[in-house]
Image (cartoon, rainbow, N blue to C red):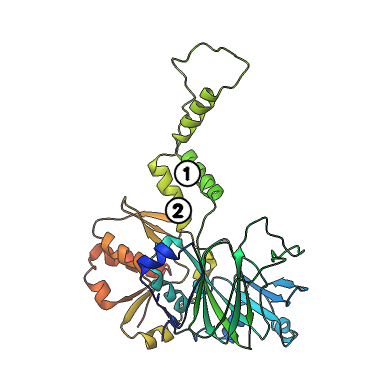
Amino acid sequence: MLPEFHLPLSAETFLAEVWQRKPLLMRDSARGLEHPDPDTLAGLALEDCVESRLMTGADKGPWNVQQGPFTAEDFAILPRQNWTLLVQSVDHFMTEVSLLLDYFQFLPGWRLEDIMLSYAVKGGSVGPHYDRYDVFLIQASGQRRWKIGPHCDDHSPRLPHDQLRLLADMPVEEEFLVGPGDVLYLPPGVGHWGVAEDDDCVTWSVGFRAPAPADLLARLTDSALENADQTLYSDAGRPVAQAPEQLTDTDMDNLRDQALALINRDALRDALAGLLSEPRQPAGLDFDIDCGHIAAAAPDTVLVRHGATRLLIDNQGHAWLNGERRQLSSMEKPLVALLARQRRYTQTDLQALMNDQSATLLEEWIDAGFFSAIE
């Protein structure tokens, strides 16, 4: 079975009443989460290109965090309780995991970031904290007790720690014991603390891309400057200066407006589409796709998108593949729209969209490792 997730309410109701508003516990809403197992997660944490962390601690601490990559010896000396292994962007390295994201099509594809997996022994936790992005916490195995606190921000008191941003005090407003298949949605800023109730506690965390406005502005500026000409500031028809020693609000407004005029629609599209189509972990393309389990679980599947491939299309006929733009012909657009919409494809999906141009494009992307055919 491949990973699945289903909202227990309509997507319209979820977005109107829950999304970025309040937590929601969804019992028995996911399945097919048996792979990867803890040994596979530990193996990923040995790799240089995989971002991983080991956290130890309980209650008020002391808390400790180690950054990967790790060695087998690091795992051998761990205590019996109170530790957690976190492996970031597992979907980038295991395409089977990325297929879960097809169940989040009630949101635009660019909003999805990655899937982190955590493995914890009894008492394992990452401490009381809050995230600055939306997250779906999906229990794959074992039980975890979640304590939910109030909304937090940068002014919320924290425990003293150079690397961790743990809350010093988190009043408990709700508490849930979750088991395999249960899903907890949390909007940004909500304090939470999950503790493993037993060994072999595996949790999938689907995180969402929420670019900082400052990063967007920096990318917009770079894009605008790439195509800017050498036109200088102009102020024909201005009145006589009444106070020549002052920089007036009117002059500042004119200077700003002429600078912002560089950010036209083309610059805006190129900057944002390029940024939002960049994968979090491009190194994942160095990993071969293991299609064996996908083929067994979904025998009608003939093609999958690599887990580290991000594909967007804009309204000007461009495809944005891992940050790079490609102009599409009219014969390529329908196929690329399908490839961008989902991650797993059947022969029926593809057959009606194939022609000489689209087939050539798909073959090019398969050869480059962005997609993989299943035989």
Residue at left offset 26%, top offset 62%: 334
Is 10 placed above or below 162 here? below
Which residue is more in the foreground, 293 or 127?
A: 127
Q: Quadrant of the C terminus?
A: bottom left
Report if the CB atoms under discs 2 and 1 are less than 8 Å apart: yes
Q: Is residue 364 visible?
A: no
The amino acid type of the residue labelled 1 equals Ser
Q: Is residue 323 above or below residue 2?
A: above
**In the rendering, at what x and y percent does residue 283 appear?**
54, 67
Residue at image mark 1: 223
Q: Is residue 85 left or right of residue 134?
A: right
The 10 Å Cα crowd at callout 2, few under 14, some 14 to 19, many 20 or more, is many
Q: Is residue 196 visible?
A: yes
- Nearer-the-camera pick, 256 or 49: 256
The residue beneath circle 2 is 274
39 vs 9: above or below: below
Q: Neighbour class for label 1 at 10 Å: few (<14), some, many (≥20)?
A: many
Q: Position of residue 271 (x, y in %)?
A: 46, 48
- Dividing the picture into quadrants, the one containing residue 314 is bottom left
| In front of the other: 127 or 340 | 127
For this view, does 328 lie left or right of residue 133?
left
Secondary structure state at the residue bearing disc 2: helix
